[in-house]
Image (cartoon, coloured by chain):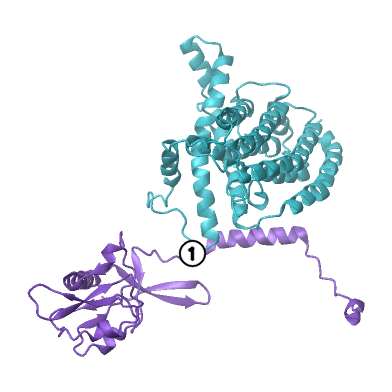
Amino acid sequence: MENRSEKEIPSRKRPNLVKAHLDAITIGLKTLLTRKPMTMMYPEVSEEWPEGYRGVIIYFYDKCIGCSLCSQICPPRAIKMYKVPGDKRLRPGYDIGRCIFCGLCVEICPVDALAESKVSDKVFDKLEQMVFDPIDWTFFTKDLQKEQETRRNKVRVIIDEEVGLRYESTVTK
Amino acid sequence: MVLDIDLVGTISTYLGLPPELVRAVLAPLIYPGLGVFTVIVLFLIWAERKIAAKVQLRVGPYYVSKRLHGALQMLADGIRVAFQEVIIPLEAEKPAYILAPILSFAALTVAFAVVPGGPGIYGFSSSMSLLIVYAAISVSPILIILMGWSSSNKFSYIGAGRETLVTIAGEVTLLASLLSVAMMYKSLDILEIVEIQRQTDIIGLVANPLAALLFFIAALLLTDRIPFDLVLGEQEIVQGPFTEYTGVLYALTLALDYGKLYVLMLLFTSLFLGGWAPFDSVILGVVAVLAKTILLLLLAVFLRSVYARMRIDQVASVFWGRLFPLALLSFIISALVAPLYG
């Protein structure tokens, strides 16, 4: 401690005030006039997710054998089995609000009746709307697939050393 | 010249009223007053947001009128605010709460009547017009303190306290630069000052750049522009003295700062940039004054995206420790350059 107090603290060089202000203003003006925004215009353009991206789980009623393995493995119990009128077997229903998108149900399904979509930006007005029974889930899946086919422009994000962020369209014509 | 139109004379003969009266009504209401001011404020707030966005590599206002790059955003916001319910807090001092923003804005319109907006375009001429503008502007801090007190809100109290500090620190510098200007031109009449600059072909910015710089910095402080936005410290005290205001009253408090900035920049144009200097005709003169003023306004709002905020103690020490001595120096410069203007 004694040594430290004796040691001379090297005095920092004081910046030239006028030059510093002028530099700040020129940098600001240069950015204003030369650089382009890095914003991705999200609702019109959206990002193409990589392979293996885990989004909302989709369900195919026709493939399902009603084994209920998915509801047993689901960690947050987002999948529960429902009784469907006119069907002997129990079918899975889905609560997006509880889902943690772990993908265990997709892996355990013996007949590939469940799959991971690449959608994770669905919006609901009410909590009740996030709970699907088997029939709802099937329709939701169909809507989602149709929406994906006619999806707005997809872009890939590229990190550029000069520009910063750049967006490249993944749609090949 | 063909472009010279005697608008005031035409209207006064048409209505049978004395031209002084027509002049005194037209100037504060249309140009350089409320009409043009409204358009400029709507443009300026959009420009402020757009410039800050561009410097920060964002897009800024965009979705209202995409073709104009969102230029009508402020018009949409203004209409929304105009029809919003005015909520008065239960604890508020009702008369003071309502009257303070209205009175402060009304005081500002007095300044519109005196500042010239072009050759022969002014509300009324006086040999003391510079002091009248200064007086009209310096009424508003008192009313802002009143707003803070009458809102009975902790943020408003803090904001009102800061307004006091800002006023004391800023107005000394502003007044010092104004007086050094008056000393330089040996006149307190803005019209006469512009005429002196036109006759000698030396603008005030060249003759006394220090006073111009101090005037600009003090104007930034008094109108809460970003390096010194203590009063409306959004990060700490929601909206300062204006926290509780809603609807039309909020729009008035918002327009108050921009109005002060507009008046001060018009004054800057007249005092330091020679007003309508290169032109004689009315229309070209008005265009020159407006162009200079808008350029200054854009510079003032551009600084928002460059600078960080300053603390209260930093502002006080900068204004009293650095700028006030410089203001005294600008008196000396004025004394030296005064012979230039005869």
Please report the residue visible at 67 percent of the width from the left and 45 percent of the height from the top. Answer: B158
Tag 1 residue: A36
Q: Position of residue B135 (x, y in %)?
A: 70, 29
Which type of secondary structure does the marked residue at label 1 adopt?
Answer: loop
Total marks shown come to: 1
Residue furthest to the left in view is A86
- Say which of B32 and B104 sits in front: B104
Whether residue A23 is visible, yes or no, is yes
Chain coloured purple in this rendering = A
- Say which of B3 and B246 sits in front: B246
Quadrant the C terminus of chain B occupies = top right
Q: In the drawing, does residue B218 fall left or right of residue A96?
A: right
Q: In the drawing, does residue A92 fall left or right of residue A169?
A: left
Quadrant the N terminus of chain B occupies = top right
* Chain bearing mark 1: A
Q: Position of residue B106 (x, y in %)?
A: 58, 27
Height in image: B224 above or below A142?
above
Q: Position of residue B201 (x, y in %)?
A: 72, 36
Residue type indicated by callout 1: Lys
Height in image: B247 above or below B135?
below
Residue B146, by quadrant, is top right
Q: In the drawing, does residue A88 fall left or right of residue B217?
A: left
Please report the residue visible at 60 percent of the width from the left and 22 percent of the height from the top. Answer: B123
Please report the residue visible at 32 percent of the width from the left and 83 percent of the height from the top. Answer: A103
- Say which of B167 and A41 sits in front: B167
- Say which of A87 and B263 sits in front: A87
Check the rendered structure and report the hue given to chain B.
cyan
